[in-house]
Image (tube, rainbow, N blue to C red):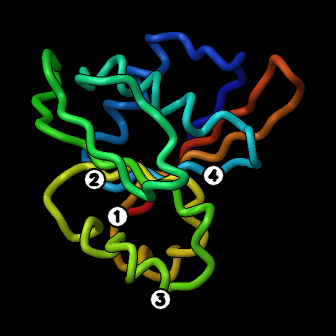
Amino acid sequence: MYEFESGPEIPDAVLLDWIKRMFPFKIWCLESNLGGGKTHLVRQFGRLLGFEKEVSSPTFSIINQYECINTSFGLNQIYHADLYRLNTLNEVHDAGVIDYLYQDAYFIIEWPELILPLLNEMPYAWIKIDTLSNDLRKYTLKLKT
């Protein structure tokens, strides 16, 4: 487990360290309260991983795809899901989320708690963001092998 506290803008050195730790895991889960900084964290990852376009919240589209360019990590694409509006595993299935879990691509998931039973057999990285104040967050990274 790795923890640190920071403002909403995480130093690049810390982000790069975490990306290197998480890189063996294709599934990255982000847990936080509403407005806690999940999508903002994905934007920061995207800047370092070379996303070809600005990250937007997939709250209504459920899943966004980002092509990666100019990245030292050698990634081609990353999928980004927001499961906030889904309430059942049937809805998760109908939205096609389960298919992305089994692709050979990286998958960042906001509000992953609903699919935790599906992840129990898979390796994944889990980041929990706790809001300590308007300007301070506690970030906890757990790697499940």
Left or right, 42 with respect to 20, comes to right
The amino acid marked with disc number 4 is Glu
Q: Is residue 25 shown to the viewer in this render? A: no
How many angstroms separate mark 1 from mark 4 (CA)?
A: 16 Å
For label 3, the residue is 90
Disc 3 is placed on an element classified as: helix
What residue sits 17% from the left and 20% below the top? 71
How many angstroms separate mark 1 from mark 2 (CA)?
A: 8 Å
Residue contact at pointers 2 and 3, CB within 8 angstroms = no
What residue sits 34% from the left and 64% below the top? 123
Query: Which is nearer the N-term, disc 1 or disc 4?
Result: 4
Residue contact at pointers 1 and 2, CB within 8 angstroms = yes
Q: Is residue 139 above or below residue 106?
A: above
For label 1, the residue is 123
The quadrant in which residue 65 appears is top left
Q: Residues within 10 Å of mark 2 (few under 14, many from 20)?
A: many
For label 2, the residue is 26
The quadrant in which residue 130 appears is top right
How many angstroms separate mark 4 from mark 3 (CA)?
A: 21 Å
Disc number for residue 31? 4
What residue sits 32% from the left and 73% below the top? 96
The quadrant the C terminus occupies is bottom left
